[in-house]
Amino acid sequence: SCADTSRSISAAVAGGRSVARATSAKVTPAMASEAIAPGAIPEEIEAKLSLPPGELPRLARRSTLAGLEKRPARTQSLHTTYLDTRRFTLARAGLALRVRRTGRRWEATLKWFGRVDDGVHRRPELTVALKGPPTLPWRPDEPELQRHLDALLAGRALVASVITAIERGRYHI
């Protein structure tokens, strides 16, 4: 088991335009979900926990949690860019596409709208390795991504919508 703590800095950008801009295209989450065969894409299962402000440093100093030994794991620097069209086609369809650099590795992750039951989030999530950083504006050429995105994107390029820099501290429990 692994506990995760993160600090992040994020900036909203969308090809130099406001992220909150409204659009009139009709794209629905059902359109994105129709292309998924049951079990065809791995499901992410994630419990999101929260602490009152100021509690994280106290928790990080503890050597045990619920009677179990807590050992630090490696801290990671994650550099992530969320991508969408200038008109937020993916977001309106219930999808999120992120490109992340972890160390020297680059990957793209496509996340579908999911569900939340008793604080546990479940959603289909497809991750593919990239050869390097994408050049923006980006048109994915990875076959697995193309299979799910081509119809929605209809040739439109992807631009940065949100950029984050996260220092992720992990603990083995």
Image (tube, grey):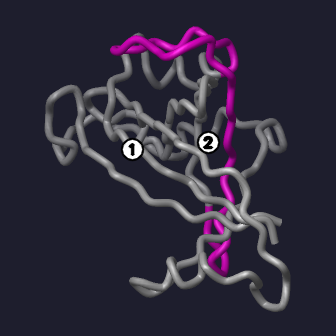
Residue that badge 1 annotates: 164
Question: Three-letter amino acid code at disc 2?
Answer: Ser
Which of the 4 image quadrants contains residue 90? Answer: top left
Residue that badge 2 annotates: 33
Please determine whether, in this image, residue 163 is positioned above or below residue 71: above
Quadrant of the rendering where the N terminus is positioned: bottom right
Of residues 62 and 129, which is closer to you in this image?
62
Figure label count: 2
Q: Tag 1's secondary structure?
A: strand
Which of the 4 image quadrants contains residue 32? Answer: top right
Please determine whether, in this image, residue 62 is positioned above or below residue 128: below
Please determine whether, in this image, residue 127 is positioned above or below residue 129: below
Q: Position of residue 81 (x, y in %)?
A: 42, 34
Q: Is residue 131 magenta?
A: yes
Question: Three-letter amino acid code at disc 1?
Answer: Thr
Q: Position of residue 141 (x, y in %)?
A: 57, 8
Query: Mark 1 or mark 2, which has the lower sequence index?
Result: 2
Q: Which dot marks residue 67? A: none
Residue at left offset 35%, top offset 15%? 136
Q: Which residues are magenta?
A: 115-144
In the picture, measured across the screen, residue 46 lies left or right of residue 135, that is right
Please determine whether, in this image, residue 7 is positioned above or below residue 97: below
Residue at left offset 69%, top offset 20%? 144
Residue at left offset 67%, top offset 72%? 120
Quadrant of the rendering where the C terminus is positioned: bottom right
Of residues 49 and 39, which is closer to you in this image?
49
Q: Position of residue 147 (x, y in %)?
A: 65, 19
Q: Is residue 133 magenta?
A: yes
Q: Position of residue 14 (x, y in %)?
A: 24, 33
Q: Which is in the foreground here, disc 1 or disc 2?
A: 1
In the picture, measured across the screen, residue 67 lies left or right of residue 32, that is right
